[in-house]
Image: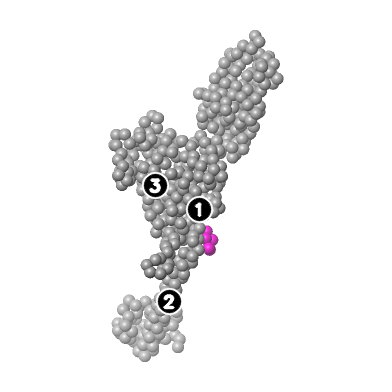
Amino acid sequence: MNNLEDGTIEYKEKINDSLEKDAVAFLNAEGGEIYIGVKDDGTVVGIASPDKLQLQIKDRLVQRISPSILHLVSISVDIKGGKSVVRVSLKKGTEPPYYIRSKGLSESGAFIRIGSSAQPMTQEMIYRLQRRSMRKTLTSIESPEQELTFGELFIHYRRYNKTLNENTFARNLRFLTEDGKYNYLAYLMADKNQLSIRFARFDDSIGFELVEKSIEYGESCLLTGLQKLLDRFEVENMTLSKLTGAPHRIDKRLVDAKSLREVIINAFAHNDYTYGMLPICEVFQNRFAIRSYGGLVPEITKEDFFKGVSVLRNPELMKIFKDVDLVESLGFGIRGILEVYNRNIFEFTDTTLYVQVPYNEEVMASANKNKIGGDAKEKSKEKSKEKSKEKSKEKIIALLQEKPTIVTSELAKSIGLSIAGVEKNLRLLKLEKKIRRIGPDKGGHWEILEG
């Protein structure tokens, strides 16, 4: 053989245990060819029973490698220098990462061709390949339900003076799989589904404590749930107004409204829905936070992201967002956010993007002051109630001392309470062991236990 081993060529003198490893490495890279019957230095030694070997190779590769590679492998016999050589041709895989089934999707089961050798793939490499192969599955994954209706979607389009044709909208919006069934994008936009947006409030000043039962927007058209979420954040994002002399005033929001909207919409536009999860939204003592799934699109780096480089994870979903004026142009939003906030509001992991938008300290201080003032008023009311209760009990004790046989209706009239109010105070006084009843209700009397 004239060529030496390289990134696309592997020689084997005979079939051995590394066959699957080398095949997987080519599938996860750019494809390549394995020649059996050739030494590492290119010397052709040939194969005695090439037809039998072809069947063995096919069975091994098909049975021992996942996902299926039937459409990616072809096996033939070449004659080199009068000798038979088996050639295994492998195309670049369409569903990476490929791996040896017995080893699983791990560093011992997944390999990639680097130079002239098969190298183990790290977990990060495996994950990045998974994300790359799954990027377009929003339109290729079949919807878990096929009896879908889209009344809310039509309403959203009409609101922006756009019409959808009943007969063609599903195909135009890419709602159908290749075999004509509704896909996951259609499921997201359907009137009913099993997906919801979780909104939760936490008090992290006393530990990570949920202070308000989570609200869920959804199980309906994603556009409807998203609009409800935006409306909720509009309420949460309070305004502080400062007069600067008539007729002028300055309004400050808890967070920059445009940036917050961009963060929320970007979270939904770039969420990896193959996780089966919608973004999660949280309110803390000093920040709003939004967590989306999938991390960065594999083709871009963090620096690309901060420069506003656009790689669409969900292009069909983005088209719908643009149709209903949720987004203007991709990439502009990130640059706009960075004009107001630092990069450190973005936290990246392999599987998530977590954005924490800090509150304006002046607005937060004003809100806390109002809250403290409100709490003080509430405490003052409670104190007044307690004092009133104590005075009522003191009056009752005084009347019981004066007339031990007094009945409930007389007490109520004398003190100015309802009969139920008097009975409640009598129960409290008995529990406090300040009074006790001697004898029946009729004919009995009250005894004071302390003085």
Q: Position of residue 269 (x, y in %)?
A: 44, 44
* Residue at mark 2: 380
Mark earlier in primary sequence (3, 1):
3
Kind of residue indicated by mark 2: Ser
Q: Quadrant of the N terminus?
A: top right
Query: Judging from the image, what secondary structure is the residue with disc 2 in?
Result: helix
Q: Residue at x 44, y 85 (%)?
A: 449
Q: Residue at x 47, y 42 (%)?
A: 272
State which region is magenta.
203-208
Q: Position of residue 279 (x, y in %)?
A: 46, 48
Task: Answer whether labels 2 and 1 touch (C-beta < 8 Å).
Answer: no
Mark earlier in primary sequence (3, 2):
3
* Residue at mark 3: 326
Q: Position of residue 312 (x, y in %)?
A: 47, 39
Left/right of residue 250 with respect to residue 303 in the rendered view: left
Q: Position of residue 145 (x, y in %)?
A: 37, 38
Kind of residue indicated by mark 1: Glu
Query: Judging from the image, what secondary structure is the residue with disc 1 in?
Result: loop
Query: Judging from the image, what secondary structure is the residue with disc 3 in?
Result: loop
Kind of residue indicated by mark 3: Leu
Specify the farthest residue to the bottom. 402
Residue 247's image quarter? bottom left
User: What is the C-alpha distance between the residues marked 3 and 1?
Assistant: 20 Å
Q: Closer to the camera: disc 2 or disc 1?
A: 1
In-front residue for pair 371/159: 159
* Residue at mark 1: 339
**Magenta residues, dominant SS class:** loop
277 shown above or below 422: above
Instruction: Check residue 191 for magenta coloring.
Output: no
Q: Quadrant of the C terminus?
A: bottom left
User: What is the C-alpha distance between the residues marked 2 and 1?
Assistant: 45 Å
